[in-house]
Amino acid sequence: MPSVLDRFLKYIQIPSQAAHDAGKVPSTPGQMTLARELGEELKSLGLADVVVDEHAYVTATLPGNTKGAPVIAFMAHLDTALEVTDDTVRPRLVENYDGGEIVLNEADGVVLSPSTFSEMLLYKGETLVVTDGTTLLGADDKAGIAEIMAALEIMIARPELPRGDVKVAFAPDEEIGHGASLLDLKKFGADFAYTVDGGAVGEISYETFNAAKAKIVIHGRSVHPGKS
């Protein structure tokens, strides 16, 4: 059984960065590549109703063993953020993190420091996964994908644990606001769904936000608005 870390390190090697203004879903071909990989893995785990549609939405069902139990879904997104490339990720493990600075790239001066990212101190003594400072890591949200896949394996290996049907969905283009836009919720058939995407262990966010992108063109004359 591959570990969560094994799966994560595998998934981040598949570039799947989203792109604005592509005019199609998924916005980039790498998301479809990752979707097909996950579809094959879900089939190999024995899940039912595995579908990878033309828009890179991946859905599947782990049949339940308890009559009348609610149908729970776990979801994650395939794409990564646009700010920095996710091509050719070179991960590095920092074992037994000591709470100090982590130099990602000495030549470029890229350093992770607790003085800037104070949450790093919460993971003192843990193993951290970092990059070489030239790419995104892709933990948003390939860590979530890896966690869901590992959880499915555990549930399959532990049939004595009572559960209803468990639904899984991996969606494209969350980073550009289209993550669930083409997911047929009625057909998906979940009573409750949890998105596995960031946050500390045990943390649940029950509200979300809305975001949009706009381009504004103003015609006029450039003037200084005050006295100089």
Image (tube, rainbow, N blue to C red):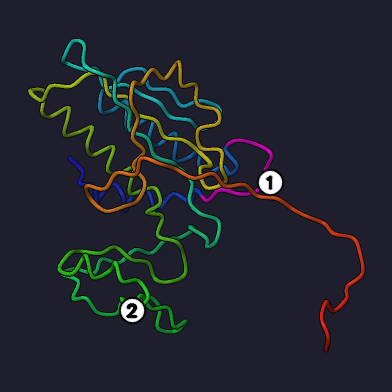
For residue 21, which numbered disc appears in the image?
Answer: 1
Decide: is 91 above or below 52.
below
- Front one among 73 and 136: 73
Q: Residue at x 55, y 61 (%)?
A: 83
Place residue 88 in its image quadrant.
bottom left
For residue 77, which numbered disc appears in the image?
Answer: none
Disc 2 is placed on an element classified as loop
Q: Residue at x 12, y 21 (%)?
A: 162
For residue 115, which numbered disc appears in the image?
Answer: 2
Closer to the N terminus: mark 2 or mark 1? 1
| Residue range corresponding to the magenta coloring | 17-25
**In the image, residue 107 lies in the stretch drawn in magenta:** no
Inter-mark Cα distance, 2 to 1: 37 Å
**Quadrant of the drawing holding the N terminus:** top left
Q: Residue at x 40, y 60 (%)?
A: 137
Q: Residue at x 28, y 28 (%)?
A: 44
Q: Position of residue 181 (x, y in %)?
A: 55, 31
